[in-house]
Image: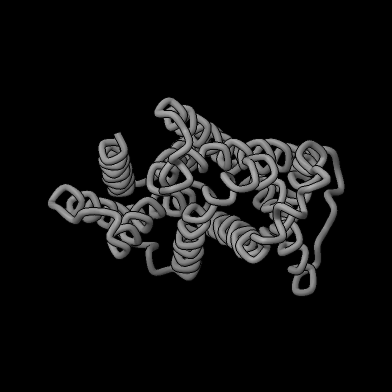
Amino acid sequence: MSHQASYPPNAARLGLLAACGAGFLWGTGALIVNVLIARHGFTPENISLWRFLVGAIALMAVFARRNLWAAVRPRLGLVLVAGTCMAMYVLCWFLGIERIGASIPTLIALCLPPVLVTLWALMKGRERLDVSLVLALVAALGGTVLLVLRHGGAAGGSGAMVAGVAFSVASAVLYAGFTLVSGRLSHDLGAGQAAACLTLVAAVVMGLTGFFRPLVWPADVPPQAWFLYLGVVTAALALLAFSWGAARLSPTALTVATLVEPLTAVVLAALLLGESLAPLQWLGGALLIGSIWALGKRCASAHG
Protein backbone atom coordinates (compact mmCIF):
# COMPACT_ATOMS: atom_id res chain seq x y z
CA MET A 1 0.00 0.00 0.00
CA SER A 2 1.36 3.37 -0.95
CA HIS A 3 0.38 5.06 2.30
CA GLN A 4 2.92 2.89 4.15
CA ALA A 5 5.92 3.81 2.04
CA SER A 6 7.09 6.80 4.08
CA TYR A 7 7.33 4.87 7.37
CA PRO A 8 10.43 2.97 8.61
CA PRO A 9 10.20 -0.81 9.27
CA ASN A 10 9.81 -0.32 13.03
CA ALA A 11 6.72 1.78 12.39
CA ALA A 12 4.86 -1.35 11.25
CA ARG A 13 5.58 -3.04 14.58
CA LEU A 14 4.36 0.01 16.48
CA GLY A 15 1.32 0.17 14.23
CA LEU A 16 0.60 -3.48 14.97
CA LEU A 17 0.84 -2.78 18.70
CA ALA A 18 -1.52 0.19 18.37
CA ALA A 19 -4.06 -1.87 16.40
CA CYS A 20 -3.88 -4.65 19.00
CA GLY A 21 -4.49 -2.07 21.71
CA ALA A 22 -7.55 -0.82 19.84
CA GLY A 23 -8.81 -4.40 19.57
CA PHE A 24 -8.41 -4.94 23.30
CA LEU A 25 -10.36 -1.77 24.14
CA TRP A 26 -13.11 -2.69 21.67
CA GLY A 27 -13.28 -6.15 23.26
CA THR A 28 -14.04 -4.62 26.67
CA GLY A 29 -16.78 -2.60 24.97
CA ALA A 30 -18.53 -5.78 23.80
CA LEU A 31 -19.07 -6.81 27.41
CA ILE A 32 -20.43 -3.38 28.37
CA VAL A 33 -22.81 -3.33 25.40
CA ASN A 34 -24.16 -6.71 26.46
CA VAL A 35 -24.78 -5.39 30.00
CA LEU A 36 -26.49 -2.22 28.76
CA ILE A 37 -28.81 -4.24 26.52
CA ALA A 38 -29.58 -7.13 28.88
CA ARG A 39 -29.76 -5.31 32.23
CA HIS A 40 -30.67 -1.71 31.40
CA GLY A 41 -32.87 -2.17 28.31
CA PHE A 42 -31.01 0.16 25.93
CA THR A 43 -31.35 -0.43 22.20
CA PRO A 44 -28.30 -0.92 19.95
CA GLU A 45 -29.15 2.35 18.16
CA ASN A 46 -29.19 4.21 21.47
CA ILE A 47 -25.85 2.79 22.56
CA SER A 48 -24.24 3.50 19.19
CA LEU A 49 -25.38 7.12 19.17
CA TRP A 50 -24.10 8.02 22.64
CA ARG A 51 -20.88 6.09 22.13
CA PHE A 52 -20.05 7.99 18.95
CA LEU A 53 -21.32 11.32 20.25
CA VAL A 54 -19.16 11.21 23.39
CA GLY A 55 -16.21 9.98 21.33
CA ALA A 56 -16.64 12.74 18.72
CA ILE A 57 -16.76 15.45 21.39
CA ALA A 58 -13.58 14.11 23.02
CA LEU A 59 -11.71 13.80 19.72
CA MET A 60 -12.83 17.17 18.36
CA ALA A 61 -11.82 18.86 21.60
CA VAL A 62 -8.28 17.53 21.17
CA PHE A 63 -7.73 17.39 17.41
CA ALA A 64 -10.00 20.02 15.81
CA ARG A 65 -7.92 22.71 14.13
CA ARG A 66 -8.54 25.75 11.96
CA ASN A 67 -7.51 24.16 8.68
CA LEU A 68 -9.25 20.83 9.33
CA TRP A 69 -12.12 21.60 6.94
CA ALA A 70 -9.69 22.58 4.20
CA ALA A 71 -7.96 19.21 4.57
CA VAL A 72 -11.22 17.25 4.72
CA ARG A 73 -13.06 18.97 1.86
CA PRO A 74 -11.19 17.23 -1.03
CA ARG A 75 -11.84 13.89 0.69
CA LEU A 76 -15.34 14.64 1.96
CA GLY A 77 -17.02 11.87 -0.02
CA LEU A 78 -14.61 9.25 1.27
CA VAL A 79 -14.93 10.55 4.85
CA LEU A 80 -18.74 10.37 4.64
CA VAL A 81 -18.72 6.84 3.21
CA ALA A 82 -16.12 5.60 5.72
CA GLY A 83 -17.89 7.23 8.67
CA THR A 84 -21.20 5.70 7.58
CA CYS A 85 -19.59 2.27 7.24
CA MET A 86 -18.11 2.67 10.70
CA ALA A 87 -21.49 3.56 12.20
CA MET A 88 -23.27 0.70 10.47
CA TYR A 89 -20.71 -2.00 11.22
CA VAL A 90 -20.84 -1.08 14.91
CA LEU A 91 -24.66 -0.98 14.86
CA CYS A 92 -24.88 -4.40 13.15
CA TRP A 93 -22.45 -5.80 15.71
CA PHE A 94 -24.58 -4.42 18.57
CA LEU A 95 -27.73 -5.84 16.95
CA GLY A 96 -26.04 -9.24 16.85
CA ILE A 97 -25.09 -8.94 20.53
CA GLU A 98 -28.68 -8.01 21.36
CA ARG A 99 -29.90 -11.31 19.92
CA ILE A 100 -27.25 -13.91 20.79
CA GLY A 101 -24.88 -12.38 23.35
CA ALA A 102 -21.37 -10.99 23.04
CA SER A 103 -19.17 -13.96 22.16
CA ILE A 104 -20.33 -15.21 18.77
CA PRO A 105 -21.10 -11.82 17.13
CA THR A 106 -17.72 -10.46 18.20
CA LEU A 107 -15.86 -13.48 16.86
CA ILE A 108 -17.68 -13.36 13.51
CA ALA A 109 -17.53 -9.58 13.12
CA LEU A 110 -13.77 -9.48 13.74
CA CYS A 111 -12.56 -12.84 12.44
CA LEU A 112 -14.18 -12.74 9.00
CA PRO A 113 -12.78 -9.37 7.81
CA PRO A 114 -9.19 -10.65 7.33
CA VAL A 115 -10.59 -13.37 5.08
CA LEU A 116 -12.69 -10.86 3.14
CA VAL A 117 -9.76 -8.47 2.78
CA THR A 118 -7.59 -11.32 1.51
CA LEU A 119 -10.22 -12.25 -1.09
CA TRP A 120 -10.33 -8.61 -2.17
CA ALA A 121 -6.53 -8.63 -2.54
CA LEU A 122 -6.75 -11.77 -4.68
CA MET A 123 -9.29 -10.18 -6.99
CA LYS A 124 -7.10 -7.08 -7.30
CA GLY A 125 -3.99 -9.14 -7.99
CA ARG A 126 -2.30 -8.00 -4.78
CA GLU A 127 -2.17 -11.48 -3.24
CA ARG A 128 -0.87 -14.77 -4.68
CA LEU A 129 -3.13 -17.82 -4.56
CA ASP A 130 -1.34 -20.93 -3.28
CA VAL A 131 -1.96 -23.99 -1.08
CA SER A 132 -1.25 -22.21 2.22
CA LEU A 133 -3.71 -19.44 1.40
CA VAL A 134 -6.42 -21.90 0.34
CA LEU A 135 -5.96 -23.89 3.57
CA ALA A 136 -6.18 -20.71 5.64
CA LEU A 137 -9.39 -19.63 3.92
CA VAL A 138 -10.98 -23.10 4.20
CA ALA A 139 -10.10 -23.24 7.90
CA ALA A 140 -11.57 -19.77 8.44
CA LEU A 141 -14.83 -20.57 6.68
CA GLY A 142 -15.11 -24.00 8.32
CA GLY A 143 -14.41 -22.47 11.71
CA THR A 144 -17.13 -19.91 11.14
CA VAL A 145 -19.67 -22.64 10.34
CA LEU A 146 -18.76 -24.55 13.51
CA LEU A 147 -18.81 -21.36 15.53
CA VAL A 148 -22.41 -20.47 14.68
CA LEU A 149 -23.69 -23.94 15.58
CA ARG A 150 -25.06 -24.38 19.10
CA HIS A 151 -24.72 -27.65 21.02
CA GLY A 152 -25.23 -30.09 18.14
CA GLY A 153 -27.12 -27.49 16.09
CA ALA A 154 -30.30 -27.68 18.17
CA ALA A 155 -30.73 -23.95 18.34
CA GLY A 156 -29.10 -23.11 15.06
CA GLY A 157 -32.43 -22.68 13.28
CA SER A 158 -33.96 -20.26 15.75
CA GLY A 159 -34.92 -16.81 14.53
CA ALA A 160 -32.70 -15.07 17.04
CA MET A 161 -29.66 -17.14 16.05
CA VAL A 162 -30.19 -16.60 12.32
CA ALA A 163 -30.72 -12.86 12.78
CA GLY A 164 -27.76 -12.55 15.14
CA VAL A 165 -25.43 -14.32 12.72
CA ALA A 166 -26.77 -12.27 9.77
CA PHE A 167 -26.12 -8.98 11.58
CA SER A 168 -22.66 -10.20 12.58
CA VAL A 169 -21.73 -11.13 9.02
CA ALA A 170 -23.02 -7.75 7.80
CA SER A 171 -20.83 -6.10 10.42
CA ALA A 172 -17.83 -8.08 9.17
CA VAL A 173 -18.41 -7.00 5.55
CA LEU A 174 -18.76 -3.33 6.52
CA TYR A 175 -15.70 -3.49 8.77
CA ALA A 176 -13.62 -5.04 6.00
CA GLY A 177 -14.60 -2.18 3.70
CA PHE A 178 -13.80 0.35 6.40
CA THR A 179 -10.30 -1.02 6.92
CA LEU A 180 -9.56 -0.80 3.19
CA VAL A 181 -9.92 3.00 3.22
CA SER A 182 -9.07 3.98 6.79
CA GLY A 183 -5.32 3.84 6.23
CA ARG A 184 -5.49 6.35 3.38
CA LEU A 185 -7.55 8.79 5.45
CA SER A 186 -5.24 8.44 8.46
CA HIS A 187 -2.20 9.09 6.27
CA ASP A 188 -3.74 12.11 4.50
CA LEU A 189 -5.41 13.79 7.50
CA GLY A 190 -3.42 12.48 10.46
CA ALA A 191 -4.64 9.77 12.82
CA GLY A 192 -6.28 12.14 15.31
CA GLN A 193 -8.04 14.27 12.71
CA ALA A 194 -9.22 11.23 10.76
CA ALA A 195 -10.57 9.58 13.91
CA ALA A 196 -12.35 12.80 14.92
CA CYS A 197 -14.01 13.28 11.53
CA LEU A 198 -15.05 9.64 11.17
CA THR A 199 -16.52 9.54 14.68
CA LEU A 200 -18.43 12.78 14.05
CA VAL A 201 -19.93 11.38 10.83
CA ALA A 202 -20.82 8.14 12.63
CA ALA A 203 -22.56 10.12 15.40
CA VAL A 204 -24.64 12.04 12.85
CA VAL A 205 -25.58 8.82 11.02
CA MET A 206 -26.66 7.19 14.27
CA GLY A 207 -28.59 10.31 15.25
CA LEU A 208 -30.75 9.78 12.16
CA THR A 209 -32.00 6.51 13.64
CA GLY A 210 -33.98 8.65 16.08
CA PHE A 211 -36.54 9.11 13.31
CA PHE A 212 -37.26 5.39 13.47
CA ARG A 213 -36.72 4.42 17.13
CA PRO A 214 -36.76 6.82 20.12
CA LEU A 215 -33.38 7.80 21.57
CA VAL A 216 -33.23 7.80 25.37
CA TRP A 217 -30.82 9.55 27.73
CA PRO A 218 -29.47 7.28 30.53
CA ALA A 219 -31.59 7.78 33.66
CA ASP A 220 -29.19 6.77 36.44
CA VAL A 221 -25.49 6.84 37.25
CA PRO A 222 -24.25 3.34 36.25
CA PRO A 223 -25.46 3.51 32.62
CA GLN A 224 -24.08 7.05 32.31
CA ALA A 225 -20.70 5.80 33.51
CA TRP A 226 -20.78 2.98 30.96
CA PHE A 227 -21.64 5.41 28.15
CA LEU A 228 -18.76 7.65 29.19
CA TYR A 229 -16.40 4.65 29.06
CA LEU A 230 -17.74 3.54 25.68
CA GLY A 231 -17.38 7.03 24.23
CA VAL A 232 -13.98 8.05 25.59
CA VAL A 233 -12.20 4.68 25.70
CA THR A 234 -13.79 2.39 23.10
CA ALA A 235 -14.66 5.12 20.57
CA ALA A 236 -12.18 8.00 20.94
CA LEU A 237 -9.05 6.31 22.32
CA ALA A 238 -9.49 3.00 20.50
CA LEU A 239 -10.24 4.62 17.13
CA LEU A 240 -7.26 6.94 17.56
CA ALA A 241 -5.00 3.92 18.11
CA PHE A 242 -6.65 2.10 15.20
CA SER A 243 -6.20 5.08 12.86
CA TRP A 244 -2.56 5.46 13.86
CA GLY A 245 -1.97 1.79 13.12
CA ALA A 246 -3.99 1.90 9.90
CA ALA A 247 -1.59 4.41 8.35
CA ARG A 248 1.31 1.98 8.99
CA LEU A 249 -0.18 -1.43 8.18
CA SER A 250 -1.71 -3.23 5.24
CA PRO A 251 -5.49 -3.81 5.50
CA THR A 252 -4.91 -7.54 6.11
CA ALA A 253 -2.41 -6.94 8.91
CA LEU A 254 -4.74 -4.32 10.39
CA THR A 255 -7.69 -6.71 10.56
CA VAL A 256 -5.47 -9.50 11.91
CA ALA A 257 -4.24 -7.25 14.73
CA THR A 258 -7.77 -6.51 15.91
CA LEU A 259 -8.28 -10.23 16.54
CA VAL A 260 -7.42 -9.20 20.09
CA GLU A 261 -10.99 -7.87 20.31
CA PRO A 262 -12.91 -11.17 20.00
CA LEU A 263 -10.44 -12.90 22.28
CA THR A 264 -10.97 -10.20 24.90
CA ALA A 265 -14.74 -10.31 24.50
CA VAL A 266 -14.98 -14.09 24.77
CA VAL A 267 -12.76 -14.28 27.85
CA LEU A 268 -14.60 -11.45 29.63
CA ALA A 269 -18.02 -12.86 28.69
CA ALA A 270 -17.04 -16.25 30.10
CA LEU A 271 -15.56 -14.80 33.29
CA LEU A 272 -18.13 -12.11 34.07
CA LEU A 273 -21.38 -13.00 32.27
CA GLY A 274 -21.30 -16.79 32.43
CA GLU A 275 -21.52 -17.17 28.63
CA SER A 276 -20.05 -20.38 27.27
CA LEU A 277 -19.34 -21.99 23.92
CA ALA A 278 -20.06 -25.62 23.02
CA PRO A 279 -17.06 -27.88 22.19
CA LEU A 280 -17.68 -27.57 18.43
CA GLN A 281 -17.79 -23.79 18.80
CA TRP A 282 -14.44 -23.79 20.60
CA LEU A 283 -13.06 -25.90 17.75
CA GLY A 284 -14.50 -23.44 15.24
CA GLY A 285 -12.99 -20.52 17.11
CA ALA A 286 -9.60 -22.25 17.19
CA LEU A 287 -9.75 -22.90 13.43
CA LEU A 288 -10.72 -19.30 12.77
CA ILE A 289 -7.97 -17.88 14.99
CA GLY A 290 -5.40 -20.26 13.51
CA SER A 291 -6.34 -19.27 9.97
CA ILE A 292 -6.02 -15.60 10.78
CA TRP A 293 -2.66 -16.17 12.46
CA ALA A 294 -1.53 -17.85 9.22
CA LEU A 295 -2.82 -14.91 7.16
CA GLY A 296 -1.00 -12.49 9.45
CA LYS A 297 2.27 -14.42 9.16
CA ARG A 298 1.88 -14.53 5.40
CA CYS A 299 1.27 -10.79 5.27
CA ALA A 300 4.30 -10.09 7.46
CA SER A 301 6.50 -12.22 5.18
CA ALA A 302 5.21 -10.42 2.10
CA HIS A 303 6.03 -7.00 3.57
CA GLY A 304 9.21 -8.06 5.35
**Residue at coordinates 63% horizontally, 63% vertically from top-left?**
84
What is the image's colouring?
A: one colour
x, y (%) of residue 290? Answer: 27, 40
x, y (%) of residue 106? Answer: 48, 49
Nearest the eye: 33 or 258: 258
Q: In the picture, residue 162 is in which quadrant?
A: bottom left
**Quadrant in which the C terminus appears:** top left
x, y (%) of residue 95? Answer: 58, 60
Nearest the eye: 302 or 7: 7
**Residue at coordinates 47% horizontally, 37% vertically from top-left?**
6
Left-right relation of 94 to 134: right
x, y (%) of residue 259? Answer: 43, 41
Left-right relation of 199 to 243: right
Is residue 283 among the parts visible in the rendering?
no
Considering only vertical position in the picture, is 160 above or below 18?
A: below
Give the total number of marks visible in the rendering.
0
Is residue 247 among the parts visible in the rendering?
yes
Given the current orientation, which residue lies at the most extreme top position? 10
Nearest the eye: 161 or 105: 105
**Residue at coordinates 76% horizontally, 49% vertically from top-left?**
68
Given the current orientation, which residue lies at the most extreme left position? 131
**Residue at coordinates 66% horizontally, 63% vertically from top-left?**
80
